Image (tube, helix red, strand yellow):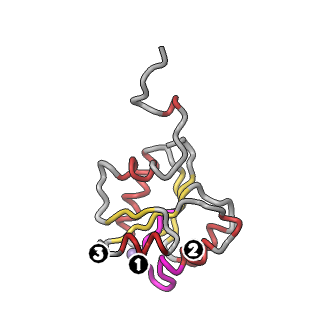
Amino acid sequence: MRPGTVILVIEDNEQNLELVQFLLEEAGAEVRAAMDADAARVNLAEKAPDLILMDIQLPGTDGLTLVTELRARSDLGRVPIIALTAHAMRGDRERFLAGGCDGYIAKPIQVSTFVEEISTYLPKADLADVHDATPVT
Ligand code: MN
């Protein structure tokens, strides 16, 4: 991903938040963290992020309710929102997509593929950032 890509991670599980933050920062992203909906709202009062990673099970306002709220905000445009949840039940993916999410990642996070999965929802990185890019001849 492009260095400096801003990703807002809304996740109440500290361990998971730390892991996600570590992996994304390692990949060059700037991570903003929020542990509940209120913190996310405060964060979003600033500049819109390039992507939002949304835990569905949050204390207080749950993730899907927050997605509905964010989708109603014109200032956020069509920022990609990726649901993050341990609930991998039949129909969940459809429910999250219908609720306004662009994608869905199941917990526990697969460390080896996580960044790649997130990257598919972001604009393609510049050629210079792509490690395995075929050299132009
Ligand atoms: Mn949670």
What are the residue bounds of the magenta stretch? 52-65
Q: Determine which residue is flagged by label 1.
A: 57
Per the model, the C-alpha gap separating discs 2 and 3 is 30 Å
Do the residues bearing badges 2 and 1 touch, measured as CB atoms within 8 Å?
no
For marks 3 and 1 on the same chain, the one whose residue lies earlier in the sequence: 1
Do the residues bearing badges 2 and 3 touch, measured as CB atoms within 8 Å?
no
- Identified at 29% across, 55% down, the residue is 110
Which residue extends farthest bottom? 60
Q: Determine which residue is flagged by label 2.
A: 39
Asked whether 15 or 52 is in front, the reply is: 52
Q: Position of residue 84 (x, y in %)?
A: 40, 67
- Identified at 47% across, 13% down, the residue is 137
- Residue 90, numbered circle: 3
- What amino acid type should be assigned to the residue bearing mark 2? Ala
Count of labels shown?
Answer: 3
Ligand 1 position by quadrant: bottom left
SS at badge 2: helix
- What amino acid type should be assigned to the residue bearing mark 3? Arg
- What amino acid type should be assigned to the residue bearing mark 1? Gln
In this view, the mark in front (2 or 1): 1
In this view, the mark in front (3 or 1): 3
Number of other residues with Cα within 10 Å of mark 1, as a class: few under 14, some 14 to 19, many 20 or more: some
For marks 2 and 1 on the same chain, the one whose residue lies earlier in the sequence: 2
Which residue extends farthest top? 137
Q: Quadrant of residue 21?
A: bottom left
- Identified at 52% across, 56% down, the residue is 31
Per the model, the C-alpha gap separating discs 3 and 1 is 17 Å
Mark 1: C-beta under 8 Å from nearest atom of ligand 1: yes
Asked if the stretch drawn in magenta spans residue 55, the answer is yes
